Image: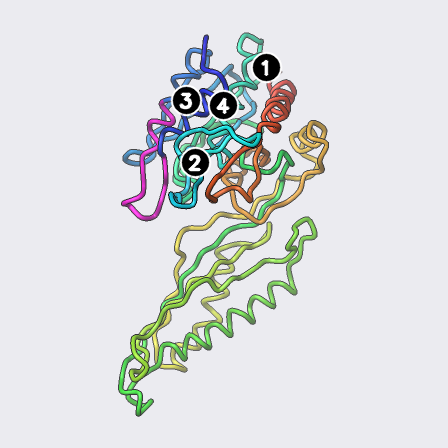
Amino acid sequence: MNTPSLQAMLASLIALPSVSCTNARQDRSNRAVVEQLAGWLEPLGFRCEIMEVAPRKANLIATLGSGPGGLVLAGHTDTVPYDAGGWRFDPFELTEAEGRWYGLGTADMKGFFPLAIEAARPFLSAPLKAPLIILATCDEETSMAGAKALVAAGRPKARYAVIGEPTSLKPIRLHKGVMMERIFIQGHSGHSSDPGLGHNAMEAMHAVISELLGFRGELQARYRNAAFTVPVPTLNLGCIHGGDNPNRICASCELQYDLRPLPGMSMEELRAAIRERLNPLAPQFGVRIDCEPLFSGVAAMETPAESLLVKAAERLTGHTAGAVAFGTEAPYFRELGMDALVLGPGHIEQAHQPDEYVELANLNPTIAILRGLIQEFCL
């Protein structure tokens, strides 16, 4: 039952590139990471299943004990791409400096897996009344394919889930949803000297933007949740592209925007409301307007404040469970019937940044918190 030290485990995981990216040239397999985790967990007594999700992509479900209920300690094995020139250290080598461990994925979130394994050690021979499941997913940073595959399979069947995203060891029971959407307008080009020769897609987009900003104002007047630092849903106009020359009527224009709904707001209802607002503009400007999501979106998440998991995490951390604006896999665990909580070492400000790190001072407190949760929900 000998496994490497905490530092050696994290160093091994950091050394295995597992970038997930919408650009296929940068996208990498995560198989080596899940196989490495299985190689450590199986000798400890965990039953390990590698779930194929897509070519070169897989989840790991590692289970200790059996029976109904149980606790899931979950994380994603992929990282975002990295800016090599921005790093002081090799992103694929665990480096200790300034009371920190540096490396790509230390905080977001390969670092959670060695901590979960360390937390499990005292319970390896214990008579568990409910199983402990260490779960590793693929492609959280892009498509959420790993979490979606779990929902499709109806697994794992457990009662509680802790997702170890970086939260500075403060429990999170709510987060906003994430929608990234595209609006494309097709008009008709013509000589700019006579507007009647064409249909200007950029002018139509101006009206579209006005409608979106008006819709944003209505949403923010209607929906509010004081648990969030930004207590209203947000809509950000992210990028716009259109036209090709000042003396041509703009034939096409594209806008991409980000919408962050609060818990209780339906993504499909939001999309339908936007389409309804924009439909009259197409005949008005003589253009075609297409609306589509850039990806399926991440639903907002809320676990009730009275959940036993929330109460236990609050007691163990000394912090009241709060809310964040970023998305996680937690809604998928909620869909599987679990109370879900986001709780992990590291700071979200370090995620997706050069010189990503986790502070050494947070390691033992994380292990202690996880052991407290295992004790409560598996024993």
Query: At 41% from the left edge and 36% from the top edge, which residue is drawn?
Result: 91
Q: Nearer the viewer, residue 375 or 39?
A: 39
Element at label 1:
loop
Instruction: Name the side, left or right, on which 92 lies relative to 157.
Output: left
Kindly report the distance in space between the C-alpha atoms of the residues bearing marks 3 and 2. Answer: 25 Å
N-terminal of the two: label 4 or label 2? 2
Residue type at mark 1 is: Lys
Q: What is the magenta segment's predominant secondary structure? A: loop
User: Residue 173: where, in percent of width, then height?
Assistant: 63, 40
Q: Callout 4: 10 Å neighbours few (<14), some, many (20+)?
A: many
Q: Callout 3: 10 Å neighbours few (<14), some, many (20+)?
A: many
Kindly report the distance in space between the C-alpha atoms of the residues bearing marks 1 and 3. Answer: 24 Å
- Residue 73 is a magenta residue: no
Query: At 60% from the left edge and 26% from the top edge, which residue is drawn?
Result: 366
What residue is pinned by disc 4? 114
Q: Tell me if residue 276 comes above or below residue 338 in the rendering.
A: below
Instruction: Name the side, left or right, on which 23 lies relative to 95.
Output: left
The magenta segment = 18-35
- What's the mark number on residue 129? 1
Kindly report the distance in space between the C-alpha atoms of the residues bearing marks 1 and 4. Answer: 24 Å
Q: Nearer the viewer, residue 167 or 159?
A: 167
- Residue 310 figure quarter: top right
